């Protein structure tokens, strides 16, 4: 039996989500300033009630390697801006044609398609401007701001979200194939989790081998998260998830390939692998273990 999607993360992770929430509002251009319609749509998409899992991942990773959360907060917000930008595009009539997102009407339904598109690109560019500006204040020794910008750009490009989305849109249930599924999920969703973890580690000037540990964790977490999302698409109602259910009917998904129990087993396996990759970090990685537990419970 699936549990209802919880709007917020549990415990300390939830508190971090609230800190992100508050900061997002401050980073937005004022909606009283031109172009008002685009600014209003950017605010609508960015501050609507999401879980903030990706920016929380950035904050948690940075703290593990000794960086105070407030020093990486805006970079974490940039990751959420990219996520919000991608949700606007994903919901458009030419993509998933969704009516509902985060319990509200989708951005294009509220503001029209042209404003929604501009708001998506507005958020994307605000994200890069934020990383470029804030990265310089961190004075990292092992990495430069350009490394952060590069990792974020790579996560979004045709080798990342865009690539995964393209094949997701083209895939049909008859294309069911484990390798294709893995490509789609790890690109359209895993890539931003990967960047979220990497940006946190780079901001904290983590050693290269620690950055690799985080990359391995985040990659597997992201893939498991997308499987849990596919499970919710078939197991939960749209009141529970805040978005249209049954969106994946025409697509190839892990749930179609492996069945509900098979997909749950695969997600658990990926999460176990993700958690075991944290061993070199010891107890200080416990908040990441909590995130993995949250993702595991979400798809059950
Ligand atoms: C150019 C930014 C950009 C993207 C172009 C449209 C696109 C390519 C990619 C879509 C990627 C996408 C929306 C993947 C689905 C990821 C996913 C599981 C979303 C739901 O995430 P949650 O549950 O949502 O964290 P909340 O609402 O809690 O933030």
Image (cartoon, rainbow, N blue to C red):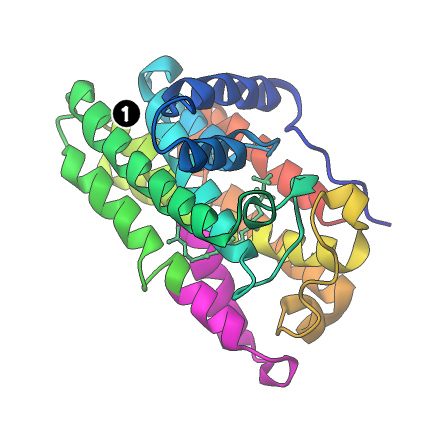
| In the image, residue 161 above or below residue 12 | below
- At which x and y percent is residue 93? 56, 62
Magenta-colored span: 163-191
What residue appears at the point 21 percent right and 46 percent down from the top-left corner?
A: 150
Res 163 seen here: yes
At 53% across and 64% down in the image, what residue appears?
A: 95
Task: Where is residue 197? Give x, y as percent.
Answer: 39, 38
Q: Secondary structure at mark 1?
A: loop
Q: Position of residue 15 (x, y in %)?
A: 58, 17
Is the residue at mark 1 in contact range of ligand 1, meaning its CB lies under 8 Å from it?
Answer: no
Q: Is residue 170 magenta?
A: yes
| 109 lies above or below 142 | below
**Frontmost residue, 139 versus 281:** 139
Label 1, on which residue?
A: 204
At a point 33% along the width and 39% down the height, the residue shown is 198
- Residue lying farthest bottom? 174
Q: How many marks?
A: 1
Residue 85 picture quarter: top left
Image coordinates for residue 239, horizontal then vertical, percent? 80, 43
Between 284 and 119, the one nearer to me in the picture: 119
Q: Label the magenta part by its dominant secondary structure.
A: helix
Is 204 contained in the magenta span?
no
Closest to the observer: 105 or 220? 105
> Can residue 206 be seen here?
no
- Left or right relative to 217: residue 198: left
Crowd band around label 1 with a 10 angstrom C-alpha radius: few (<14), some (14–19), many (20+)? many
């Amino acid at each position: 039996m699936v549990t209802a999607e919880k709007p917020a993360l549990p415990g300390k992770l939830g508190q971090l989500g609230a800190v992100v929430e508050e900061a997002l509002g401050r980073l937005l251009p004022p909606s009283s300033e031109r172009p008002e319609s685009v600014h209003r749509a950017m605010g609508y998409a960015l501050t609507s009630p999401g879980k903030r899992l990706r920016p929380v991942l950035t904050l948690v990773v940075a703290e593990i390697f000794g960086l105070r959360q407030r020093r990486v907060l805006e970079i974490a917000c940039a990751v959420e801006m990219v996520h919000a930008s991608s949700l606007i595009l994903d919901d458009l009539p030419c993509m998933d044609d969704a009516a509902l997102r985060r319990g509200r009407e989708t951005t294009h339904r509220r503001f029209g398609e042209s404003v929604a598109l501009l708001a998506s690109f507005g958020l994307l560019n605000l994200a890069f401007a934020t990383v470029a500006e804030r990265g310089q204040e961190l004075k990292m020794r092992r990495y430069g701001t350009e490394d952060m910008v590069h990792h974020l750009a790579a996560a979004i490009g045709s080798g990342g979200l865009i690539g995964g989305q393209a094949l997701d849109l083209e895939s049909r249930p008859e294309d069911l194939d484990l390798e294709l599924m893995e490509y789609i999920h790890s690109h359209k969703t895993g890539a931003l989790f990967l960047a979220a973890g990497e940006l946190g580690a780079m901001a904290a000037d983590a050693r290269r081998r620690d950055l690799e540990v985080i990359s391995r964790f985040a990659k597997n977490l992201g893939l498991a998260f997308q499987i849990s999302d596919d499970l919710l698409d078939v197991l939960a109602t749209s009141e529970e998830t805040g978005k249209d259910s049954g969106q994946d009917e025409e697509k190839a998904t892990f749930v179609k390939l492996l069945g509900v129990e098979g997909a749950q087993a695969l997600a658990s396996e990926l999460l176990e692998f993700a958690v075991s990759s944290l061993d070199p970090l010891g107890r200080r990685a416990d908040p990441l273990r909590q995130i993995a537990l949250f993702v595991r419970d979400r798809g059950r």
